[in-house]
């Protein structure tokens, strides 16, 4: 039986996992994604991501030229093809018990880098669409704004939001526990 309780909460309070119908030992033994090991993939991760984004963009430009689309349509298509559902792939790998394998860590690292690069690409494309063209200077300025925003968002989520949510959600989950009438 699967619990609807957040795993981190149940791992801290096994009584809570039991009340919600979960198995506390299964929750404590869930796979962890080793982000430090993924970060060590470094150059290879960025290289693979760059190649994949370039190939998807090239493929979409080819499709766009065959279908006689304007330039912006294939560029948006390429960005959409380059993005992937990282969460779904991570869940599948976790269910298969392969999340901690080196190949899985590299794959997830590549997907995260691709997703961040696609966000940057879509921001640049979106700013170029109203004017019809964009200069290198405008792209660099936009990149200088977006990169710190993404970095700050990731850092804030890692250092502030996750601990805050873990601290706040346990009392909220306990308050939502079903009321038993004798």
Image (spheres, grey):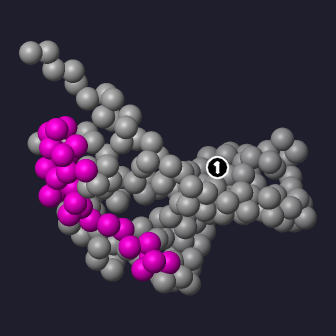
Q: Is residue 137 above or below residue 17?
A: below
| Camera-nearest residue between 158 and 34 | 158
Residue located 16% across and 38% down the image: 19
Residue located 86% across and 52% down the image: 133
Say if residue 180 shows up in the picture. yes
Residue 149 sits in quarter: bottom right
Q: Is residue 176 above or below residue 132?
A: above
Q: Is residue 81 left or right of residue 181?
A: right
Whole-percent x, y for residue 179 in the image: 21, 21
Could you say whether the residue bearing mark 1 is in a helix, strand or loop?
Answer: helix
Part of the protein shown in magenta: 13-39
Whole-percent x, y for residue 90 in the image: 34, 60
Is 82 magenta? The answer is: no
Residue 156 sits in quarter: bottom right
Q: Is residue 65 left or right of residue 35?
A: right
Q: Is residue 103 left or right of residue 156?
A: left
Q: Please identify the residue farthest to the front as the structure is shown.
A: 182
Q: Quadrant of the N terminus?
A: top left
Residue underneath mark 1: 76
Q: Quadrant of the C terminus?
A: top left
Say if residue 62 shows up in the picture. no
């Amino acid at each position: 039986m699967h619990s609807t309780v957040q795993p981190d909460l149940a791992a801290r309070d096994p009584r809570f996992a039991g009340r919600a119908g979960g198995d506390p030992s299964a929750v404590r033994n869930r796979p962890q994604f080793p982000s430090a090991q993924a970060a060590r993939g470094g150059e290879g991760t960025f290289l693979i991501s760059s190649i994949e984004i370039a190939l998807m963009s090239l493929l979409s430009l080819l499709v766009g030229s065959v279908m006689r689309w304007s330039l912006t349509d294939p560029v948006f298509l390429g960005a959409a093809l380059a993005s992937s559902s990282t969460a779904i792939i991570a869940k599948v790998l976790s269910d298969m018990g392969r999340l901690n394998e080196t190949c899985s860590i590299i794959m997830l690292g590549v997907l995260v880098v691709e997703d961040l690069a696609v966000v940057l690409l879509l921001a640049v494309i979106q700013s170029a669409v109203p004017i019809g063209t964009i200069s290198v200077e405008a792209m660099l300025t936009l990149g200088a704004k977006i990169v710190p925003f993404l970095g700050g968002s990731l850092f804030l989520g890692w250092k502030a939001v996750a601990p805050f949510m873990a601290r706040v959600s346990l009392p909220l989950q306990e308050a939502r526990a079903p009321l038993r009438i004798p």
